[in-house]
Amino acid sequence: MKILVLGAGVVGTTAAYTLARDGHEVTVVERHAGAALGTSYSNAGLVSPGDATAWASPAALKTFLQSLYRPDLGIKVRLRFDPYFVMWSLRFLTQCTTARCRANTDVKLRLALYSRECINEIAAEAGIDYDQRARGILYFFRSKESLATGTGNLRYLAEHGLEIEIVDRDRLVELEPSLAQAEVAGGVYSPMDQTGDSRLFVQGLAAYAGEKLGVTFRFDTTVEGLDVADNKVKAVKTSAGSLSADAVVVAMGPESGLLGRKYGVDLPVYPVKGYTVTVPLEDPARGPTMGGVDEDRLIAYSRLGDRLRLASTAEFAGFDRSHRPSDFVTLFRTAGELFPGAFDERKAERWAGLRPMMPNSVPVIGRARYENLYLDTGHGHVGWTMAAGSACLLADLVAGRKTAIDPKGLLYEG
């Protein structure tokens, strides 16, 4: 079958790989000049089932409302007239109950644990080196009070399949000696989690898929619309002309919703802006040996070879990808406190990108509205974690075979 995949980020490229592995003729359409130059360019670097808790929760509702008047929070809302954001917010509010949070978390964790297996399998098949580390991730707290109250989400994940260890300060420093000088009280160690550079992974996989599986990548090509007739997508309209296919997969990250609503696909994906820093380690011995999350300041980091990746903030600002030096002050200050003397911020690469977030925090995978239109999008802040599992699930659905995991909660229901 001839399949068009729209988007060459980590989600689209892994989908193209699994579909081509099944024997399909796959072409990937991407508006950038290469793979992983959008949302997948610089995420936190965490492949983290331990971060599978749904954003939409009673606690998130409180933080979301406080963000309207408190600029110091990790969630920020830039007030502007955007009817689509208003609609998204109303749907988000319906998901902020304890029952819905747990149901959505169950779905995310199921996919995240499966995806961890899939990414390792794919990396081994393609022989990709992406600065990966399978040492686990530390989720730590700065005070005994926040430690006592903040481990609930991870304990819930542990009850549903995630291996964790609750650690005091001494054990935390034993696991991560570079935090010896940091103000931390303890945390949760998730040995099942891992880290790696999604850009290196995607670019390596794209090269392998093109050379070994015959996948065609059409870069510098913008998707402009769909040619729909008789309940099928006949072709995709692009800046380079019309491209026909037997099936189309939408994996366009935050732009997925813009395309879908033009054609009656109920796909409430909204862009959530995040900021990252990548800086070389001047003294690698002072840097972290594994990934981590400062739960009190909502800052994540990962060790990528001899580089340190820092990430923070969930900002609702539409499709604005701009950034200013002030956006990174807290990142640098926190990293300097955690890893003093490890890096020189003057050498840092600063970046801002958009995460495709669904109101329920759960991605949408599978056939949608038209007979040959498939979705693989809406992964939010854990797209790197869930992309490989989503791709394997999508390949199963396209082939019509029994899926490796229960797809309940992930399928399109519009």
Image (tube, grey):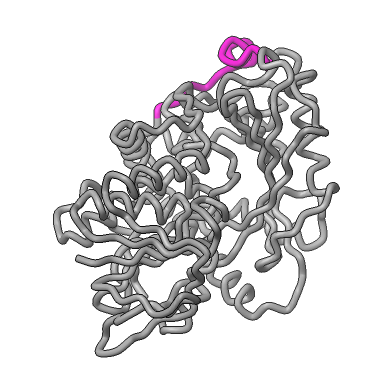
Residue at the location (33% across, 79% down)? 235
Compare residues 309 and 164 and report the one nearer the observer: 309
Q: Nearer the viewer, residue 319 or 215?
A: 215
Residue lying furthest bottom in this view?
A: 230
Which residue occupies 69% across, 52% down?
Answer: 352
For this rendering, which residue is in front, 357 or 256? 256
Residue 166 in magenta stretch: yes
Q: Position of residue 301 (x, y in %)?
A: 63, 33
Q: Which residue ends up furthest to the right in the rendered image?
A: 326
Report the side of 81 relative to 365 (left or right). Answer: right
**Residue 270 pos. (x, y %):** 57, 66
Name which residue lies at 63% across and 21% down. Answer: 288
Q: Position of residue 103 (x, y in %)?
A: 40, 53
Image height of 388 relative to 286, above or below:
below
Q: Picture quarter containing residue 232?
A: bottom left
Camera sees residue 358? no
Q: Nearer the viewer, residue 228 or 262?
A: 228
Q: Residue 85 lies in what quarter of the image?
A: bottom right
Q: Where residue 303 appears, x then y in whole percent? A: 59, 27
Apparent side of residue 277 relative to residue 161 in the rendered image (left or right): right
Q: Please, is residue 226 above or below residue 160 in the view?
A: below
- Up the image or down, 133 lies above or below 408; here it is above
Please identify the quarter of the rendering in which residue 346 is found.
top right
View extreme (left): residue: 401
Residue range of the region highlighted in magenta in the rendering = 163-179
Residue 155 can be seen in this image: yes
| 113 horizontally vs 61: left or right | left
